[in-house]
Image (cartoon, rainbow, N blue to C red):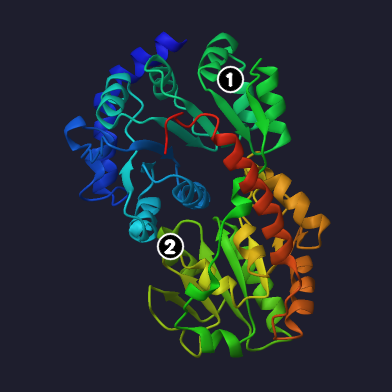
Amino acid sequence: MILFYRVTTTLLYPIFIFIIFFRRFLGKEDKVRFKEKIFVKNFNVERNIKKKLIWFHAASIGEFKSILPVIEELNKDYKNIQFLITTVTLSSANLANDELKKFNNITHRFFPVDVKFIIKKFLNLWKPNAIFLVDSEIWPNLILTSKENKIPLCVINARLTKKSYKRWMLFPKSANKIFRSIDLFLASNLETKEFLNNLKIENVILNGNIKLFSKINTDRIINQNEQTLLKKRFWIAASTHNSEEAFCLKTHLKIKQKFKDIVTIIFPRHIKRVNQIKKLSEDFSLKSQILNKDERILENKEVIIVNTFGEMQKYFYFAKSVFIGKSLIKKLEKEGGQNPIEAAKLGCKIYHGPYVYNFKEIYDIFENQGISTKVNNSNELHDFLLKDLENNTKSENGRSDLINDLGEKVLKDTMKNISKILPNDIQ
C-alpha cells in the first residue's frame, strides 16, 4: 500500500500542478506564492544554519491560531531557535502575514504537495530539527521520509475520527508502519487515543485540545462599529454553511415580532457565498448589507453579512449570543461542528445544532458548565435568544476564567510533552 501511494502520488504530480494552477486562476490560491506548493525552485528557503529549526504544519486558520501560544512559549524558553510554519489554505496564509509580523524568527510557507521527491527536497533544503503536525495532518511521504532522515516528528492535538479510523483499518499494516514512524502523538481527545491504541500505537498521550489555550488580547480588539454594536440588539451566526443561513433568517423573523430593531450578523464559513446569502435575505424581505473590511454598518440594515476573514473576535467581544454553524446539516453528522472556543472565551452564550462531532469533547465541557446549549429548530433558538436579548447589556459570568484555566493546564502539559522530541542541544 505504501509503495502504491508513493508511485501514485509521483505519477499524479503533473495533475497536481494543473490543479494548483487552475485553483490560482479561480482565485483560490495566492497569485504570487502558489508555486511554493509544487516547484522546488520556489521553496524560497531562508534557513539560519546557526539556529535550530522547528517546523509546524497547520492546515488552516484554526490550526494555525492554535499553535501560536506554543511558539510563544518556546520563544521564551529558547533563544537559539527558528520556526517554519506551513499552511495549506489561502485564508490561513493571509492571517499568517498579519499575525507573524511581531516575530523576527518565523517564516511562513505553503505546504508542498506530498510527493516523495518534492518532500525529500523540501527536507534537505530546510533541514528541520523537529517537525510538529497539527490535528489530522497525516501525510505518508512526509512522515516516512522524515523517519528515514531521523528527524523527530510529533502530531500535536492529534485527532482521528471514526471515519478516518475505518479507512486506515482497510490497510492495517501500512497504517501501523506510518503511525509507528511518528515519535509522539498528543491526542486531543479520548476517542483518538483509543483508535491509535487499536492500531497498536503506544506512544500516545492524552493531552487535551490545544485550541482551549488560544490567547485573546482584548486590548487589541478595535471595532469601527463599536458604537453601533453597543446600542443595537444583535446576535451572531458564525461559521455558517449552506442552508444554515435560512435557519438563522427564520429565527430573525421570529425575534423581530418582539424586537423590531433586531440585527443578525452572519459570518459565513466561506465568504464567496456572501452574494448568495444577500439574495436569500432579500427573499425573506430583510434589508441586508455585505460588510467589507473597515466598512461601517448602515443604520437601516437588519442582516449584516461579513465579507472578511479574521474579524469574528471583534464582534464576539460585544455579543451576548452566538450560534455556531456546521451543526445543523444531517449529511455532515460525522464531521460537523466548528470551533466555539473564541466566542466562549469572550463571554458569549453558545448555541449549536445537533451535529458537532468535530468538537464533541469541547461542547460536552461547555454544556456541563452552562456555556453552550443544543437547539434542534429555529423555535428553540428563538426562545433562548429572546431571553438573552431582554437585557441589552453583556454581563461577565465567569466563562472566560473557566476556559482559561482549562487552557493553561493543556498548555502546560503540551510544553512538557513536546520537550521530549526537541533537539537535546537546543539552547
- What is the CA distance from the residue labelled 2 to the residue labelled 1? 34 Å
Mark 1 neighbour class, 10 Å CA radius: few under 14, some 14 to 19, many 20 or more? some
Looking at the image, can residue 280 be seen? yes
**Residue 295 at x, y percent in the picture:** 39, 80
Q: Quadrant of residue 83?
A: top left
Looking at the image, can residue 158 be seen? no
Residue wearing tag 2 = 309
In-front residue for pair 202/423: 423
How many numbered marks have been drawn onto this rendered protein structure? 2
In-front residue for pair 214/16: 214
Quadrant showing the C terminus: top left
Q: Which mark is residue 168?
A: 1
In-front residue for pair 15/168: 168
> What residue appears at the point 57 percent right and 56 percent down from the top-left corner?
214
**Among numbered discs 2 and 1, the one appearing first in the sequence:** 1
**Residue 175 at x, y percent in the picture:** 55, 16
Up-down relation of residue 194 to residue 133 (above or below) = above
> What residue appears at the point 46 percent right and 56 percent down from the top-left corner?
270
**Residue 146 at x, y percent in the picture:** 40, 21
User: Disc 1 marks which amino acid?
Assistant: Trp
Judged from the image, the secondary structure of the residue bearing numbered disc 1 is: helix
User: Disc 2 marks which amino acid?
Assistant: Phe
Q: Which mark is residue 235?
A: none
Mark 2 neighbour class, 10 Å CA radius: few under 14, some 14 to 19, many 20 or more? some
Q: Quadrant of residue 166?
A: top right
In-front residue for pair 291/365: 365
Judged from the image, the secondary structure of the residue bearing numbered disc 2 is: loop
